[in-house]
Structure formats: structure tokens, C-alpha cells
Image (cartoon, rainbow, N blue to C red):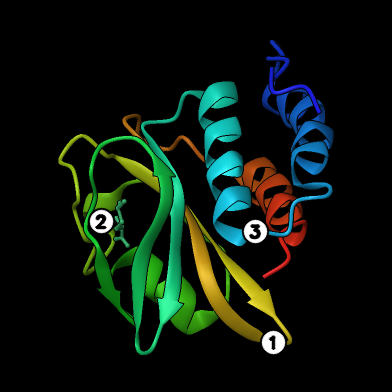
Amino acid sequence: MAEDLIIQKGNKQEQYLSLIPQIKALLEGESDLVANLANIAGALKEQFNWFWVGFYLVKGDQLVLGPFQGPVACTRINKGRGVCGTSWAKSETLIVPDVEKFPGHIACSSLSKSEIVVPLIKDGIVWGVLDVDSEMLNHFDETDKIFLEQIVDCIKS
Ligand code: SME
């Protein structure tokens, strides 16, 4: 497959609608999880240029940093801690418009202002999370939730 991503201009929905088939094409025929997570993080970063986008994977009773794009980040997060650990504990997507108002938020970078975390679920069990951080307040909404959930649904663990 071609490795060049076509970057779509336009509103958020138009950008996701262009990106999702390209992500599916990237994953097609590749069974290696780390390779696929790395390409998804890369594709999302290229399209949206978010401050930080990447994965944490459940290992024992912690989330451990996986493939990501952006500044270096905390490596381990306990279940129920921060936005990622809470998304894991609740098995649900969390949209945080202002991270300073989220009790227990883990500040890997003081530049991060808002965040969305989407759990990766197989057979009812969370096996990781997709975490996206923005330098802008209130950056993420239901559109991001809908499309990012579609994207993580494409990942085969
Ligand atoms: N802020 C996250 C931690 C991960 S970093 O933002 C990359 C949290 O509270 O879970």
C-alpha cells in the first residue's frame, strides 16, 4: 500500500471521513499490534496535529505507555487514576474539556488543556486506551467520540 496519507481539509467530520478508510487500508494485511497502533497514532497526528496522541496498554494492574506521537509521557498509570485510568475503570469514553477541573488528572505536560480517552475493549474487557491531548481548552466533542470509537473498533488485539 501507499504510505502517503491524504490530508483532508474541512470540518472535523470531513477530516475523519477521509481518514478512516485510509486507517483501515493501513491496518489491512498487517497483524502486528504495535505496528498498527503506531500507524494509527501517526495518521491521527498527521491529520489533526494534536499535541499528543497515543496508546496505553493494560499490563497487569496498570496501563503502560504504548505507541504515540508527541512529547515524552508518563509510562505507567494505575487503574482509576487520571483520565486514562478512569476510562479504563469505567469502560467508557471520557471527554475532558478542562483537564485542571478533572480530579486526579495526571499532567504529563502542563501544555495539555483538554483531553479525550477512548477505551479499547474486547469481549467486554478493556485492554488499552487511546488518549488524545490538546493544547486548547474544550477541543473534543461528540464528533471526536463517535469517530475515534469507530477507529479503535478497527484494531484487532
Ligand atoms: N493526562 C493523562 C495521562 C496521560 S498523558 O496525558 C499522555 C491522564 O490523566 O490520564
Q: Do the residues labelled 1 and 3 touch (CB within 8 Å)?
A: no
Q: Is residue 122 left or right of residue 74?
A: right
**Residue positioned 25% across, 56% down in the render:** 101
Crowdedness of circle 1 by 10 Å Cα count: few (<14), some, many (20+)? few
Image height check: is 106 above or below 47?
Answer: below
Q: Is residue 122 left or right of residue 66?
A: right
Residue 101 has which mark? 2
Q: SS of the residue at dot 1? A: loop
Specify the amino acid type for callout 3.
Asp
Which of 6/11 is in front? 6
Residue under pointer 3 = 32
Q: In which quarter of the image is residue 6?
A: top right
Which of 25/73 is in front? 25
Specify the amino acid type for callout 1.
Gly
Crowdedness of circle 3 by 10 Å Cα count: few (<14), some, many (20+)? few
Crowdedness of circle 2 by 10 Å Cα count: few (<14), some, many (20+)? few
Q: Is residue 111 left or right of residue 39?
A: left
Residue farthest along the left direction in this orientation: 110
Q: In which quarter of the image is residue 124?
A: bottom right
Q: SS of the residue at dot 3? A: loop
Q: Where is residue 86 in the image (x, y as percent from the top left)?
A: 40, 75
Q: In this view, does 23 lie to the left or right of 80?
A: right
User: What is the spatial separation of the Cα atoms under label 1 and label 3, in whole angstroms?
Assistant: 22 Å
**Residue positioned 36% across, 43% down in the render:** 114
Residue under pointer 1 = 124
Which of 31/21 is in front? 31
Q: Which of marks 1 and 2 is nearer the N terminus?
A: 2
